[in-house]
Amino acid sequence: MAKRFVAAMIKHETNTFSPIPTPLGSFAVGYPGGRPLSGRAAIDAYGGANIGLAAYIDLAREEGAELDVPMAANAAPSGPVSDDAFERMAEPVVAAVRKGCDALFLDLHGAMVTESHDDGEGELLRRVRAVAPDLPIAVSLDFHTNMSRTMVESATVMTGYCTYPHIDMYETAARAGRTLSRTLKGEIKPVIVWGKRPMLTHTLKQGHAVQPLKDIMDRAVAAERSGEVLNASVFGGFPMADIPHVGLTAILMADRETRAAEALRDSLLDMAWERRADFVYEVEPLAASITHAKTLDGGPIVLVDHGDNVFSGGTQDVMETVAESFRQGLTDMAVGPIWDPQAVKEMVKAGVGTKVTVKLGGKTSMPALGLQGQPLEVTGTVRRITDGRYKVTCPMKTGLMMDHGASAVLDTGAAEILVCSERMEAFDLGVFRHAGIEPTAKRYLLIKSRQHFRAGFEPIAKHIVLLSGPGVTSSDYGLFRFDNVPRPLYPLDRAMTL
């Protein structure tokens, strides 16, 4: 008889400081019915894309297995997931396992916090184990996983992204899937070896292609490719989460014998700890960064507002970086997307070609930082109105349809500003091109991002300037109150020793 596989995707990176709520509808942006996909609709939507679920779909096809996809849900990072949303996503997965299956393949993020659970992925796995104690389970995870003991003890196989920006989503799940497939065939008996260091690393220092992470990640990748271990993953962790599970983690998959994996784990973690000071990003005043950008030759000059990055939980409507750019006289700019559904409605109502004045952005206050929303009044001509949909062509999430809802372009003369109805990071050039803005033709591109922009924008950038604007994804940890993280924790406690 053909094997029966269950595969599911539930992904959310929770910024516990973010004021943006996360109901079930947040996991269904761009899809009808206001709910996530399942079954054939999920397979059709995600199959063939550069994401983990697609790898599991392909594996089931290769193995000739019957595939049940009870849940495919992915939401932009924001505040804690509502209990209602978590229950309505978790229960179909547990129910599918309860029916009986040969293996479960999960495409998870690893940093989900819900209203009632500081370890969303661990709670999902705990529930699965309650109904299927011996079920082989493969889990692929984001590089920004905040690893918990429950997660580790509930999985059979775990792998994580080796890249940031995350261009290996498909391959990460394929790695987990291949290892579990070998397990099902009796070829191997995987054992998880893991460890953690008390480091709250800065996201802007987590790029896989540059130090301090580069040769740590290279060592892990080489160990897996050479067969030293079955799988090797290093997780930088997600720092904007006030929970007990933060930290830098190494996960190694060994085949029965664990000594080599344990030695590799210790080596990787020791390298990271020795470089802990190098994982700290020192912020620069916003005005100084933009002043520097004005001295650079050529273009495009990519201005990256990393304090308000939606893919880290930012509101995407903080206007300080835009305001400072105008104050300093920058021109020939493309800006966006800025999240402001109300402004979009006003521009749509006015129509293309109409001159309008709108109070843009600044609709969201951030109590965790004591910041009030401050709209920026701008006047310009409505150039285009779009549906906000385009297919990704850059190496990250390649082939996936993106949707930031009804959108409009406001031309102020100095800048073409893309305004959207749904929060979405600018990481693929399609974000501008679908709205008739050619990014390579602009001198300045002002976007809200941290590292993912490098997948699409770095290849066209003449220069990149990081802007430390305000917001709930700021790299200044002194702005945040951490009450629930384990202490001591570097760099909150810089004098600590192991």
Image (tube, helix red, strand yellow):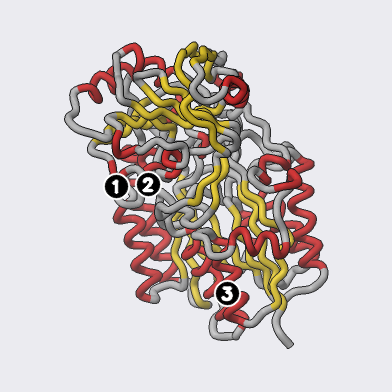
Q: Nearer the viewer, mark 2 or mark 3?
A: 2
Question: In the figure, residue 481 lies in which quadrant?
Answer: top right
Please tell me which of labels 2 and 3 falls first in the chain. 3
In the image, taking residue 256 as reference, residue 432 lies left or right, namely left
Please tell me which of labels 3 and 1 falls first in the chain. 3
In the image, taking residue 279 as reference, residue 151 lies left or right, namely right
Where 100 sits versus 274, above or below? below
Where 157 sits versus 372, above or below? below
Picture coordinates of residue 392, whole percent (x, y): 47, 51
Residue 456: which numbered mark, if any?
Answer: 2
Name which residue lies at 28% across and 18% down: 288
Q: Secondary structure at mark 1?
A: helix
The amino acid marked with disc number 1 is Pro
Whether residues under marks 3 and 1 lie with C-beta atoms below 8 angstroms apart, the answer is no
Q: Secondary structure at mark 3?
A: helix
Name which residue lies at 59% across and 34% down: 406
The amino acid marked with disc number 2 is Gly
Picture coordinates of residue 419, whole percent (x, y): 51, 28
The answer to which of 57 and 430 lies nearer the viewer is: 430
Kindly identify which residue carries mark 3.
59
User: Total label count?
Assistant: 3
Kindly identify which residue carries mark 1.
459
Whether residues under marks 2 and 1 lie with C-beta atoms below 8 angstroms apart, the answer is yes
